[in-house]
Amino acid sequence: DIVMTQTPLSSPVTLGQPASISCRSSQGLVHSDGNTYLSWLQQRPGQPPRLLIYKISNRFSGVPDRFSGSGAGTDFTLKISRVEAEDVGVYYCVQATQFPRTFGQGTKVEVK
Amino acid sequence: EVQLLESGGGLVQPGGSLRLSCAASGFTFSNFAMSWVRQAPGKGLEWVSGISGSDSGTYYADSVKGRFTISRDNSKNTLYLQMNSLRAEDTAVYFCATDYGSYLPQLAYWGQGTLVTVSS
């Protein structure tokens, strides 16, 4: 199984400041169709997960443009350009290149 | 509007069984694989099982293989998870989610979840 490792596990941020989360996979995530199925999910307190970014850098419908994804190979990054109060929650990377799907441990973003 | 509504959770004794359902609407259900993902209290997300749109392929996490069975009824737009030989460590909120398909990215939509508690 592919192991997904996120850093940091906790990220205290000041509102209006940027935040960055890293995700590393134990092996490459390029699918046989040429796509890299690395996504980022946001989970606000008491809510189900919500898709933010798919295929490394594509924002899903309705996701603000302050969220961006990048990376290649085995190293990926989620960036929030200016953290807003509604961004508080836990962020997960997940690979959907193969079964079983595997998630990172989650990174808790909280306001300082 | 895509909607996924899970049901069937509850309290069950160790060794018991439960069947979860996920009613889907707002998209062409048969065109999409589906997954079950669970979250133990205070913990992260764990993928449990997946099924292709045509029901021709099923996939399981090692932790549930041989105990859980995923299935779907495309005529009813409903996904199922039959859970047998339940253990305390299966206690979690179970979410269904859309997986790969024709016009949506994987894990695009999620239900609100249903709580399964395994305890004597």
Image (spheres, rainbow, N blue to C red):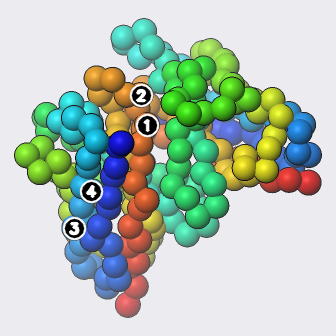
Mark pair 3, 2: CA separation: 27 Å
Q: Is residue B33 above or below residue A45?
A: above
Residue B108: numbered disc: 1
User: Which chain does tag 1 point to?
Assistant: B
The amino acid type found where label 3 is placed reads Arg
The amino acid type found where label 4 is placed reads Cys
Which residue is at the front of the view, A31 or B5? Answer: B5
Dividing the picture into quadrants, the one containing residue A70 is top right
Q: Which residue is mark 2?
A: B105
Mark pair 1, 3: CA separation: 24 Å
User: Which chain does tag 4 point to?
Assistant: B
Residue at point 26% right, 47% down? B25
User: Which chain does tag 3 point to?
Assistant: B
x and y, in percent, of residue A75 in the image: 67, 22
Residue B22: numbered disc: 4
Mark pair 1, 2: CA separation: 6 Å
Do dots 1 and 2 share one subunit? Answer: yes
Q: Mark 4 falls on what kind of element?
A: strand
